[in-house]
Amino acid sequence: MPDKENQIRALPLLPLKNSVLFPGLLMPLAIGRATSLSAVEVALATEEKEIVVVAQRDPSVDVVGAEQLYTIGVRAVIRKASRSKENHIDALVFGLERVVIVKVDEGDGHLSARVRVLSAPDDSSRETEALTLAIVDLGTKFVGLAQPSNASPQELARMFTSQEDPMQLAFLVASMMGLEVTREQALLEAPTRLEALRMVHGWLAHEVEVLTLRNKIAEEARGEMSREQREYILRQQKRAIEQELGEKNADQSEVEAMRERLTKADLPEDVRKEAERELARLEKMSSSQPDYSMLRTWLEYVIELPWNKRSEDHLDLARARQVLDEDHFGITKVKERIVEQLAILKLNPEAKAPILCLVGAPGVGKTSLGQSIARALGRKFERMSLGGMHDEAELRGHRRTYIGALPGRLIQAMRRAGASNPVMMLDEVDKLGRDFRGDPAHALLEVLDPEQNKTFRDNYLDLPFDLSKVLFVTTANSLDTIPAPLLDRMEIIRLSGYSEEEKAQIALRYLLPRQLKQAGLTAEQCDVTEPALKKIISAYTREAGVRRLEQALGRVIRKVAVHFAEGKTDAVVVKAGDVSEMLGPEPFSPETMRRDLPAGVATGLAWTESGGDVLYIEATLLPNGKDLTITGQLGEVMQESAKTARSYVWSHAAALGIDPNLFLNSGLHIHVPAGAIPKDGPSAGVTMTTALASLYSGKPARSDTAMTGEVTLTGLVLPIGGVKEKVLAARRVGIKRVILPRGNQKDLRDLPEEVRNEMEFIFADRVEDVLGAMLPDMILLPAKAA
Ligand SMILES: Nc1ncnc2c1ncn2[C@@H]1O[C@H](COP(=O)(O)OP(=O)(O)OP(=O)(O)O)[C@@H](O)[C@H]1O
Ligand SMILES: [Mg+2]
């Protein structure tokens, strides 16, 4: 053996730039340097094909001399060599043993080395054994950690343990570690096995520790990455692939389109920010996520809502008047109010919009007037019925988190309107409901408050929306059921009913032409005469408004249309006599006044939701009774009027020439006929008092006079509402004499002139004035003379 060790051999030398060849291991090499090529060729020309492989100290040096080479290398054999291209050889070399380079010779175009074998003493010990085991273990772990995908731990462990020489194990493991050249070289130079094992063990332990830590950190990071983020990354990758393939994903183009719309939309700054935030969220979602379409709908609302968009007002007063007149007959007070508003807007475009409340009987034109107001101002018109609305959420919407949530009706209407200043009609505020789901009146309070509606917050939208430019017009049949705080915020405009003459005018100018047009007929083809109209009005309708009248006219016109459809061409003239043939039997026999009233009956006037009515109050004495009985579906206030009337008459019995014992010895029954219609209100006071005075005095009241007015216990007559309807009702039944409270004298202005001229009005300050006008036969004694 010593011989071998001392034997010097000369072999061609192959310098390696970046690696170290270990004995017992194969290494593929790409050889390109001229000197290296020449050395390999010389080696290949020999029978053994042996060569010395040595690492250079500095990998950047191309032409190396002896001083650039380590002094310990490996004797190797070239197992395979192929010339893939000119000046290039791919070779596979196998390390045989460590050698010490004694001398390097330069010449013949390549390096050659004189080498001597470097052997290691057999230093097997407990320690080398232990280190060997530890290296097998750590080595397996290391490869598993470093390349988790292709590691088969059992196979590796088998390969490691099959190494008989511990030094060889050290080389094998080290070759897998990707160590720096200096370390590999140090290992190659290791004087003993123990030294080599210690080196590799040290490096392995360190590497395994580092790798374990790295994997742990990566694992933690992955854990922190939420499902959403992972999906986002995947989606990004998918998108990149799609872009590469020239495909565009549907969601993405939708988001892009949305972004473009958002950029173009005119939004307040904070709204835009919020929308952009949500759009970014949408972008990360897939359309299959349940939230996706919810978010998209929300964004669509935000983009489409008229945040800053206003329609231009028509500020021409003359034109506005003309439009209002075109649509509606009469109701001059209301029309003037609209024109006033226009004037205000003309002077101050930023003026707060008023909140109008149109009150009146059905069919008097409240709803259609709203439309007309919008037309006159040149604004968009939106109408929503509040009738029967129970749920506050209907107005204000549901939070977005509810499945299928949508904005409330207000915001929906704003989107439809497409302008922030529409005329918004809130129809039937008096029919607003309320129940466990909340009180829509609350939301309305906010909406109708000019101080609050600048920042109206819909639950769904969850962004403040400015409603202050909206012109709200509410309608109601009566004010009784409107919550007081709501009523406070509105400007009440009353639309009283129409007289028969007015109705005839409305029919001639508006309803008839409309019905003819609908039926495709011309005025020449069909003429409805004025007497026929009057007949329809009086015998076929009984209403304050004109809705039934329009329906009846519609029926007449349809009959005429049939006439033409059957091929006849002669014009049709509808006369009063034809009406019953066309409309069937008259539903209302013309009401007439009761001619002879017995003592105890008086003619009153009442206001109902459908207009005015004549109302008879009947009173009778009950012999031997004592109680007061009241029938006829009277409300509380009306019952109180009955009691007040009785007390008044009783307390003034002497002055009225009445025997006070009547009050002590007989009971009293007051009845108000005319069906099951509930009646209430204080305005029957004068009538009650008159009926009782007539009853107790036994003197009948005048039958040609009707009256209305509230009475206090001390006999004052106070003003009441609905004067126009009441007077028209009296006139309808043929009563031409009406007693009104003095305080209502001003309301006569609302009456058509012909009505005013035809009727006789008596204005009462006190009950005595009423009684004096009603009971001509009664001798009224001055109170103090009693
Ligand atoms: N002064 C008027 N001139 C012309 N047409 C009228 C007039 N008043 C009412 N009309 C017509 O009568 C019809 C009924 O009116 P509208 O529907 O506006 O009544 P309304 O007051 O809203 O009733 P409701 O309280 O029942 O809702 C409409 O076609 C309307 O054009
Ligand atoms: Mg209406």
Image: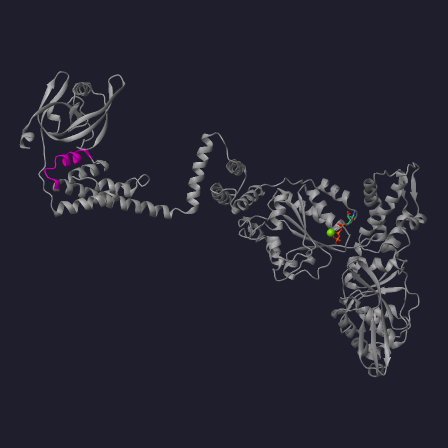
Image vertical order of residue 622 relative to residue 25, above or below: below
Q: Nearer the viewer, residue 404 or 317?
A: 404
In the image, what residue occupies the spot 90% across and 41% down?
563
Residue 775 magenta: no
Image quadrant where residue 632 sits:
bottom right
Q: Is residue 27 left or right of residue 703?
A: left
34 sits left or right of 778 in the view: left
Q: Position of residue 97 (x, y in %)?
A: 14, 31
Residue in front for this viewpoint, 786 or 343: 343
Residue 4 position by quadrant: top left
Which residue lies most toward the right here?
577
Image quadrant in which the C terminus is located: bottom right
Check the image and report above or below for 559 versus 716: above
Judge whether 101 appears above or below 573 on screen. above
Picture coordinates of residue 549, whole percent (x, y): 83, 50
In the image, residue 182 lies in the stretch drawn in magenta? yes
Residue, x 24% and y 19% (percent of image)?
88
Q: Main secondary structure of the magenta part?
A: helix
In the image, 68 versus 315, the foreground residue is 68
Q: Quick check: can you spot residue 658? A: no
Magenta part of the protein: which range?
180-193
Q: Position of residue 710 (x, y in %)?
A: 77, 67
- In screen coordinates, is 274 left or right of 729? left
- Residue 365 in sight here: yes
Report x, y in % for residue 326.
Answer: 77, 42
Residue at the spot 75% in from the left edge and 72% down from the top edge: 640
Task: Tell me where residue 476 sits by quadrant.
Answer: bottom right
